[in-house]
Image: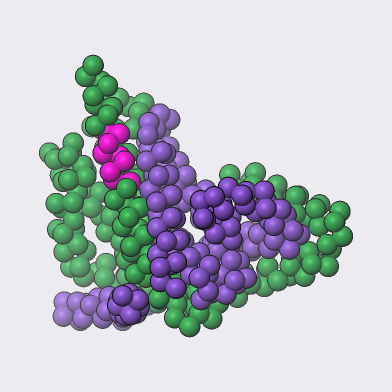
């Protein structure tokens, strides 16, 4: 994807700047850009290490188990087709817990494991099953309790209150999540009707 | 209302850290060792995205300074005005579902240009926090089980993204 987008961006902006005589701006922005990437990474390092450390403490306690238990009823509602499949339920719940805690690196492998388990139950192996679609929608909904990356960026840019976005993020995520789930449920209902006809 | 939201936002991170540390302490885990172990992972995350950030900051920065971004925004401006959507946010809204690292670059660029605590800057932050790189996630998950027929997953998750972005814009307008 980026192999296509990146060169196009560079070609368009560099050639436009050269032909429109905007060279001085272009030159200074080249160095500004790489400098701000360095600044961002250095300041981000602090927040990212802090949060990864704290989450690693959480992973080693019973907090994970408690969260898993709390998610059970939600998973039963979202994935009615796998009521009997304990393994799939556990994997999905682990994936959601990792998402909530912002463990990006851990959540993807867990989610892919769940996909594999769901594929075993899938009647049509060429097509995503209803449960798989719900799992993907849940993963694109970004349910995260602390949006670490963006807080790190805000603090690196000298925000007066980097964490002030947390509650607005929750509200927006919840709205997006509810709509995502509703739309998915509606599509599932509609496709069932069509099959029955 | 704004006070409550600010208070809860400020409370969230310290409270979660406190709960986790208390839990670890009560369960007699080696809290500090585990913390250090995890913090090392944090370094890896930042180092891994650093080269991407350099490349994308360059692309986004020059796109803006050359004037190309302004032209692109002007082209879609009438449409955005009709929907009462802030034009400054549009590049982010378009890139967000496609690429995580380039949307970080665009969001940072917006926050720097309009001020990190300005309405537009906060909007960019909330959008980043509330949405995901949808296309990437769909691609990774579907290809992991070698499925090409993805049915309605794209429509469902892009609808959710659109709602997330619109809600972010509305909330930030209400708050400021």
Residue A177 visible, this angle = yes
State the image coordinates of residue A120 (x, y, percent, origin top left).
26, 33
Whether B5 is among the magenta residues is: no
Residue in the image at 40% along x and 68% along y: B174
Magenta residues (range)? A180-188
Q: Which quarter shows the N terminus of chain B?
A: bottom left
Of A96 and B8, nearer the camera is B8
Left or right for A78, reference B66: left
Q: Quadrant of residue B40?
A: bottom left
Of A28 and B93, nearer the camera is B93
What secondary structure prevails in the magenta region?
A: helix
State the image coordinates of residue A30 (x, y, percent, origin top left).
74, 66
State the image coordinates of residue A150 (x, y, percent, origin top left).
46, 68
Q: Which quarter shows the C terminus of chain B?
A: bottom left
Residue in the image at 16% along x and 59% along y: A70
What color does chain A have in the rendering?
Answer: green
| Residue lying furthest front | B82
Q: As displayed, is residue A27 above or below residue A116?
A: below
Q: Quadrant of residue A184?
A: top left
Q: How many marks?
A: 0
Residue in the image at 48% along x and 65% along y: B123
Q: As displayed, is residue A51 above or below residue A132?
A: below
Tell me which colouring the rendered structure shows: by chain
Q: As displayed, is residue A70 above or below residue B11?
A: above
Left or right for B113, reference B165: right
Residue A107 visible, this angle = no
State the image coordinates of residue A101 (x, y, percent, origin top left).
31, 64
What color does chain B have in the rendering?
Answer: purple
């Amino acid at each position: 994807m980026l192999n296509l987008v990146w060169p196009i961006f560079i070609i368009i902006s560099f050639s436009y700047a050269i032909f429109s005589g905007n060279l001085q701006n272009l030159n200074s922005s080249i160095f500004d850009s790489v400098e701000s990437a360095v600044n961002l990474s250095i300041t981000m390092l602090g927040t990212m290490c802090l949060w990864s450390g704290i989450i690693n403490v959480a992973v080693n306690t019973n907090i994970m188990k408690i969260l898993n238990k709390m998610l059970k009823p939600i998973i039963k509602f979202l994935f009615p087709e796998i009521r009997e499949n304990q393994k799939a339920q556990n994997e999905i719940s682990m994936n959601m817990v990792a998402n909530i805690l912002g463990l990006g690196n851990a959540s993807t492998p867990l989610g892919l494991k769940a996909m594999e388990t769901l594929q075993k139950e899938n009647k049509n192996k060429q097509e995503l099953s209803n449960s798989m679609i719900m799992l993907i929608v849940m993963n694109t909904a970004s349910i995260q309790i602390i949006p670490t990356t963006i807080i790190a960026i805000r603090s690196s840019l000298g925000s007066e209150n980097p964490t002030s976005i947390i509650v607005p993020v929750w509200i927006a995520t919840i709205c997006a999540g509810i709509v995502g789930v509703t739309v998915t449920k509606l599509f599932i209902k509609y496709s069932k009707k069509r099959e029955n006809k | 209302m704004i006070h409550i939201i600010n208070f809860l936002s400020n409370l969230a991170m310290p409270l979660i850290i406190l709960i986790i540390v208390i839990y670890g302490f009560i369960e007699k885990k080696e809290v500090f060792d585990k913390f250090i172990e995890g913090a090392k992972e944090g370094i890896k995350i930042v180092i891994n995205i650093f080269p991407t950030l350099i490349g994308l900051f360059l692309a986004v920065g020059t796109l803006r300074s050359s004037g190309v971004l302004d032209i692109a925004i002007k082209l879609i401006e009438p449409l955005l005005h009709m929907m009462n959507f802030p034009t400054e946010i549009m590049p982010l809204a378009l890139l967000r579902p496609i690429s995580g690292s380039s949307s970080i670059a665009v969001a940072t660029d917006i926050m720097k240009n309009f001020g990190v605590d300005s309405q537009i800057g906060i909007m960019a932050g909330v959008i980043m926090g509330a949405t995901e790189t949808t296309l990437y996630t769909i691609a990774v998950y579907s290809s992991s089980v070698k499925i090409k027929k993805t049915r309605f997953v794209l429509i469902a998750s892009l609808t959710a993204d659109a709602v997330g972005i619109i809600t972010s814009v509305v909330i930030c307008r209400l708050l400021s």
